[in-house]
Image (spheres, helix red, strand yellow):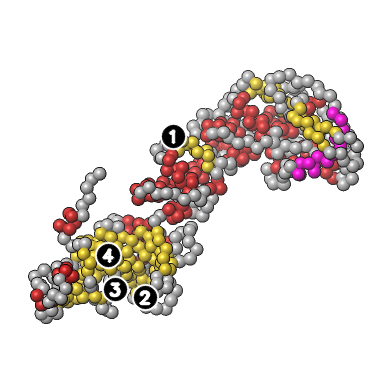
Amino acid sequence: MPDQRVSRASTVSSASSLTDPQQPPPLQNDYGDIFADLGLLRDDSDSSTMLSYRDDNFARNASHTSSVSPVPAALTTQTIAQTAVPPATGSDTANFANLAANVNIPQILPHEQVFSIQVGDTLFRLSGASLSSDGPSYFTRFFSAQRSSNSKDPVLYIDRSPDVFRDIVRHLQGYYVVAKDVYHFVYLYADAHYYQLPKLAKHLFNSEIFMRIGSEEFTISRELLSQPGDSPNFFSLGFSNFFASPQEIFPGTRGLIRPPAVAPPSVRAHSNELFGQILQALKGMPIKFESPEHREALLRECRYYHFRGLEQRLIPFTLSKSLFTGREEISIRLKDFKPQGASMESSNTERRRIEYKRPFVDTEARELIVQVERDEFMLRAYDVVIGDGSTRSKCRWGVEITEGCTGGEKLKKLIQKLPGLSDKTDDNRPLRLRVDLQDAAMKLNGDDVDAQVSDDGFVDVFADEYSWKKRRRVEGSDPARISTDAPFPTKLSLQSGQFKMYVMKESLVLHAVCLDAISTLKEANRRREDLV
């Protein structure tokens, strides 16, 4: 059998006149197999937006022996392409108009009839199959009413943009429509609602998010916003409010000549450069932090856009394994600590460690070490015991957390979360916790402190705050020569420090890992930084 040429037709033309084409030769191949190979036959609920034609008898009859019917002239007004079809065995033929039934286009309007719509200064002519593919709509209701009144060849005039309507026509013809920019998206979405095209409105609502951030436009894939902890977010919630249902976005628009003007969504008060880096991080690409301030700015943007998962991936942290205990440890700042990620180890020991896993990121809990910021904690000595004629003093230390600081609020929430400790906090007074200094590396006023901690938690220190300096500077110095006029300070301002935490006797205890504290106003003034 010689090769045959098949012409496919479009269902729309512009203001140019229509001519009656000649009848093409019979179709000699199974169009269903061709469309299936091209991936055009879809079984999902939105398959009717992909416009293709196939004969019902052709789909039901395994022998494919249907007869050839003439192709209506109105459906072949414009040739799209000439495609060579390989020869086939048998008489595989199909009626070009009836092929639309394959994608479940409803019979709202006659599929083979052509309808005229003038938008602005441009005339469009679409088949009933195209108009019915996304219906019922404003178009199908209008032409159904005209057919009921026996009006001949009515022309629907709409005073809207023909450029936007061309993309709507492509959608009705079965093409995948993509917005070009944020303004084009808003125009398409507004007209989709105005023309009451449910499938196009749903497609645009679920497509990429178009948003202007700062001075730059961004196209955001919804897949990037669906990672654990990053959804719901500013964009998904904002889009749901900005682009709601047809009744909510354009209330009372039925009967109006045009819908109201809608400005594109934008966030002009935030940095487009930072958001571009956030998008790169959402794609899995690493961010090179230029400074601690740069990291803090990115974290603030993550919190603003409600990217909680990304925030946890960008906070500073370290993972390590103790060579002495063999336990895995995670170190984070107390201000980045999330109480919902903390838990007590499951053991029957007297001291039960606090473990932590970052929400949305970690799959296993590790022993927690929190880093305290400057001037958040005040160390105080309690139960001071001075022996008769001794140059040493014993004291038990505790921490008083500065009222209103972020770290204190985090620890209060942790105490409320842990079982049996919920009644240990009082909003009317600062939080006080016991501190364990055993094995802690300590600095006081910039110099190392060698303090011995007994098993009962008491700390043995020299009575003279300068005694430990003299002992370090002069080897073999006599302790009897040490002055006892200035006792060891019992109030220290913590400049930085790291703590583990454990629960003992229904109390939360901070186990100091390393501390840097000051005891005098002179030392505090020495550490003041110059303004830059």
Relative placement, left or right, of 42 versus 442 is: right
Closer to the chain start, of discs 1 and 3, is 1
Closer to the chain start, of discs 2 and 4, is 2
Count the marks: how many? 4
Discs 2/1, front: 1
Q: Which residue is mark 1?
A: 215
| Residue at mark 3 to residue at mark 4: CA–CA distance | 12 Å
The residue shown at (78%, 31%) is: 82
Which quarter of the rendered picture does the N terminus lie within?
top right
The residue shown at (11%, 80%) is: 388
Which quarter of the rendered picture does the C terminus lie within?
top left
Closer to the chain start, of discs 3 and 4, is 3
> Disc 3 marks which amino acid?
Gln
Magenta residues span 24-37
Q: Position of residue 503 (x, y in %)?
A: 36, 72
Q: Which residue is mark 4?
A: 515
Magenta stretch: includes residue 349: no
| Residue at mark 1 to residue at mark 4: CA–CA distance | 45 Å
Discs 1/4, front: 4
Closer to the chain start, of discs 2 and 1, is 1
Q: Residues within 10 Å of mark 4 (few under 14, many from 20)?
A: many
> Disc 1 marks which amino acid?
Ser
Q: Position of residue 449 (x, y in %)?
A: 22, 69
> Do residues under tags 1 and 4 come within 8 Å of each other at their CB atoms?
no
- Mark linked to residue 438: 3
Q: Which residue is mark 2?
A: 351
Magenta stretch: includes residue 33: yes
Discs 2/4, front: 4
The residue shown at (43%, 37%) is: 214
Q: Position of residue 465 (x, y in %)?
A: 15, 68
Q: Residue furthest front?
A: 475
